[in-house]
Amino acid sequence: MGKTEDNVRNITNLVRQAAGQGAKIIVLPECVVQGYLDPTTWTSWSTSETGTVAVCRVAEPIPGPTSALLGHLADELNVYLCVGLIEAVTNRFFNSQILLSPDGAIIAHHQKKALWAPGDSTWCMPGDLPVQVVKTGFGNIGLMICFDFHVLPPLLAKQEADIVLYSVGWYGP
């Protein structure tokens, strides 16, 4: 949690490895850029501006510095890259996901709609962006994050998603 530079370095290495093994669509975990939850202590982000887990210290806009950096990586490797990150929008925070195209552009942007009580309902807002489904050479791709599986599948089906890129930060049984 909060070690964005280290996380981005690890993400970059793993994405390069996946692309090197032939992956064309790479899906990263929920909030992979900033971290989601500390599973050893059940520590979650806080909306307080003080303390080591202050979400305002790590959240960023979309587009922003990390989406630009990872966009260059998607372009370099010619892959679709689905990235989970904590988004800041005028003092509101969202558990978000973007889909970067093989030319590095953000082609879809999703904010988690169904919040999980222990993990993110204390620090982020339910997303208010429309359901995201985009046409690609692989078919219509939709986006969904973790607990969204309670509400999004019928909406993604209605928009004719062929593939759903599903980011999850779960680590337990």
Image (spheres, grey):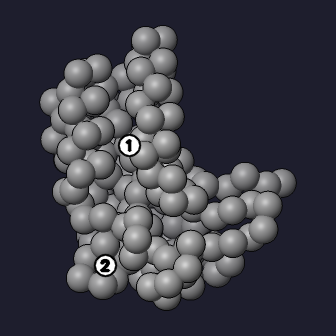
Snapshot quadrant of residue 109: bottom left
Where's residue 100, x and y in %? Answer: 26, 41
Q: Could you tell me residue 22's position as x and y percent? A: 43, 13
Q: How far across and down, in percent of the image, does residue 169 sit?
A: 60, 55
Query: On screen, 74 above or below 149?
Result: above
Name the residue carrying label 1: 82
Q: Nearer the viewer, residue 118 or 115?
A: 118
Q: CA distance from mark 2 to mark 1?
A: 19 Å
Residue furthest out toward the right:
173
Q: Secondary structure at mark 1?
A: strand
The residue positioned 37% from the left and 22% from the top of the image is 24
- Would you call the spot at circle 2 few (<14 residues within 10 Å), some (14-19), or many (20 or more)? few
Amino acid at dot 1 = Cys
Residue occupied by mark 2: 128
> Type of residue at label 2?
Asp
Element carrying mark 2: loop
Task: Give left or right: position of 53 versus 134.
Answer: right
